[in-house]
Image (tube, rainbow, N blue to C red):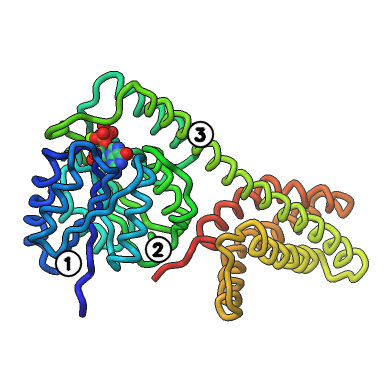
Amino acid sequence: MAKVRVVNLLSTYNEKENVQPMVTTLEAIAVKLPQYEFVTLVVDSHSPDGTGQIVKDLAKTRKNLYLLETPRGLGISLLQGYQYALKELQAGIVIPNDCDFQWDPQLIPQMLAKMEQGYDVVVPSRHLKGGGDNFSAFRKLTHFISNDLFNYYWAGIREVKDLAGNFKVIRVKGILDQVPLEKLNVKGFVIQSTMIYELSKTGAKFVEIPAVYGERRAGEAKVGFNAQFIKDILETVKNATRIRLERSQQFFRFAVVGFAGYIINAIALQIFAEVMHLGESFAWLFSTELSIISNFTFNNLWTFKKHQIQGIGSLIKKFFHFNLTSLGALMIMTTAGTVGVKLLGEQYRQILLPFIIVFLVVPYNYFMYTRFIWRTKKK
Ligand SMILES: Nc1nc2c(ncn2[C@@H]2O[C@H](COP(=O)(O)OP(=O)(O)O)[C@@H](O)[C@H]2O)c(=O)[nH]1
Ligand SMILES: [Mg+2]
């Protein structure tokens, strides 16, 4: 069997002192992990200090070192790098990292071991016990504002706690290759949380491991109070808001479909109970099942369009699966409805219905749907 190809994706801007030590450090790690085939791809934004030239020189004596020259901007550069790693280098795993040793590349074996346990994205985290940073008060504050306030709370990206780091191990098959990289329009540092969000939409399984964000080995950080910094803040706010809206649009559609399901449920309940005299329990059971069918159909066609289930085979399978997860709701409805009508009388039937839906079924269903039905299934 061919070895899995791991692409170390290094972003550089003025890293002339760091790039060679990083390349050789990664080579030493590769020797310890012969079960993988390691390749290094440097994305350099035409660094004025000549980082790109150093990489070109190093590549003369190496077959597994590549340079991709990119426009300025960490986001732009990484997005181009990811695409290059997938299309040109046939990556099986991509490991983006900074080139200044702040994230310790020695964590790579441990991170790959996590992936072998079945995780799709392994994230080193400053926010776990045992992790941390050496930030100044100013950097602590900016990290808190962008990571915690905007990305975690406002955008609602909660898959991991540390959303701002570059370093991670990402599986390609079914995960990174499902991210619409060419359509993502982010230029700066907000690429990091955006990638976590996009990866989460593929159904990726995340895990964080504690890590310390150390001192930069040489050279200077690009983050400081300058024009770029302002642009990064604005982009963070804009992007977090976009993600928030995207998520609430999904919720809005979900609510509309749910309301249509309710109308169907209410009319069918009335007909089954009053016109067809099916008996209280059957009226609740069948009318609820009709609304389940309607919910499945419209959520698939509209609410979760991006994750739309295709092909008649998997559609039937998913419908069965959907009914299984809706079984709880069906039982809640039938039992609560039947008992409620027995206790209160038939005149309360149409009052009980919305009451049961709002307080019992909707919370239960939203949880189940987003968790099990419209997540991309992976092997
Ligand atoms: N290709 C590319 N890399 C960049 C750019 N800006 C920063 N980097 C690299 O991204 C990594 C993180 O940047 P750094 O300034 O260390 O940010 P900090 O660690 O958050 O202070 C480093 O390896 C930088 O060289 C850019 O515009 N283009
Ligand atoms: Mg750094």
348 left or right, relative to 75: right
Helix, strand or loop under label 2: helix
Q: Do tag 2 and tag 3 residues touch (Cβ < 8 Å)?
A: no
Real-space Cα distance between discs 2 and 1? Answer: 19 Å
Of marks 3 and 1, which one's residue comes earlier in the chain?
Answer: 1
| CA distance for labels 3 and 1 | 40 Å
Residue labelled with disc 1:
37
Q: Does residue 128 appear in the picture of this structure? A: no
Check residue 98 in the rendering and tell me which mark sits there, or answer none: none
Kind of residue at badge 1: Glu
The answer to which of marks 2 and 1 sits earlier in the sequence is: 1
Label 1 sits on a secondary structure element that is strand
Q: Ligand 1 near label 2 (Cβ, under 8 Å)?
A: no
Residue labelled with disc 2: 177
Report crowding for label 3: few under 14, some 14 to 19, many 20 or more residues within 10 A (C-alpha).
some
The residue at which mark 3 appears reads as 154
Labels 2 and 1 touching (C-beta < 8 A): no
Residue found at x 84% / y 71%: 278
Please provide percent x and percent y for residue 337. Answer: 75, 56
Name the side, left or right, on which 115 lies relative to 325.
left
